[in-house]
Image: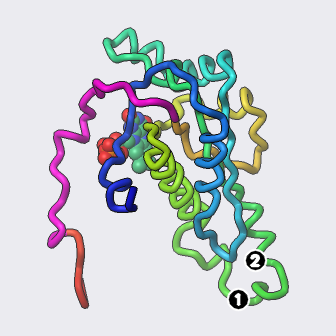
């Protein structure tokens, strides 16, 4: 598939078939996701992959799946066979920008936003696109109980999880998300040439 087709096919997938995913395919997806840019090439993004049944069910609870199911939605996380938690580690950036070739220049204290979030977003997008390229579906969601997720997965205090990405074989009947009712902004409205 060409990149434009991969991008065009990507949707947040919230309903999966329970079939397992080939671990070698998951490895390829994770390897692709870690190849994004990073400020100072600090490489402060980590990917935590979970396939264990019990742990995935516990993550589903921490994301309030039982409440969503009680409210009439389909189960999402408990069915998806692979969960990936992309994480960023700000300390990696502070250490990198203290190295001789960076010290004295512009660093984390000067950034308009902490660049680790930008790097995390780049990794997240690669993860979603690599899943599509592998013929799988992927979906991102916010974690209701972040503290619980940290405890469950032994995430160190100086590491920030971005959310949970589910990977798996997409079910054919995807639910319409609230986002699908919104029209995509027009190209001419969103892209600015020469000046705003
Ligand atoms: C930072 C971020 C957080 C999101 N959190 C959730 C979430 O908690 N639950 C969910 O169902 N979708 C979540 N989404 C998915 C968006 O709703 C979705 O990307 C948007 O509606 C556009 O649909 P598409 O990605 O399928 O094109 C999130 C997306 C982003 C970028």
Q: In this view, does 29 lie above or below 174?
A: below
Question: Quick check: is the Cβ at mark 1 less than 8 Å away from ligand 1?
Answer: no
- Prevalent SS, magenta region: loop
> What element does badge 1 sit on?
loop
Taking the spot 79% from the left edge, 88% from the top edge, the residue there is: 101
Foreground of the two, 52 or 41: 52
Quadrant including the N terminus? bottom left
The mark that comes first in sequence, 2 or 1, is 2
Say which quarter of the image contains residue 193.
bottom left
Query: Taking 57 as reference, is 98 left or right?
Result: right
Q: Position of residue 39 (x, y in %)?
A: 64, 73
Residue 186 is one of the magenta-drawn residues? yes
Foreground of the two, 27 or 191: 27
* Disc on res. 97: 2
Look at mark 1 in the image and give the residue it sits on.
105
How many numbered callouts? 2
Marks 2,1: beta carbons within 8 A:
yes
Q: In this view, does 13 lie above or below 175?
A: below
């Amino acid at each position: 598939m060409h990149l434009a087709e991969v991008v065009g096919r990507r949707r947040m997938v919230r309903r999966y078939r329970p079939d397992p995913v080939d671990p070698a395919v998951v490895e390829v997806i994770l390897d692709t996701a870690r190849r994004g840019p990073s400020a100072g090439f600090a490489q402060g993004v980590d990917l935590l992959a979970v396939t264990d049944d019990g742990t995935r069910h516990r993550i589903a609870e921490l994301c309030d799946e039982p409440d969503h199911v009680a409210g009439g939605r389909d189960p999402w996380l408990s069915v998806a066979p692979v969960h990936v938690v992309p994480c960023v580690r700000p300390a990696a950036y502070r250490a990198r920008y203290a190295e001789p070739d960076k010290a004295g220049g512009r660093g984390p204290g000067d950034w308009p936003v902490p660049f680790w979030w930008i790097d995390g977003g780049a990794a997240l997008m690669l993860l979603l696109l690599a899943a599509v390229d592998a013929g799988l579906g992927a979906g991102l969601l916010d974690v209701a109980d972040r503290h619980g997720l940290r405890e469950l997965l032994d995430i160190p205090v100086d590491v920030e999880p971005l959310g949970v990405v589910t990977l798996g074989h997409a079910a054919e009947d995807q639910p319409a998300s609230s986002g699908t009712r919104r029209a995509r902004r027009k190209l001419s409205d969103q892209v600015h040439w020469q000046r705003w």
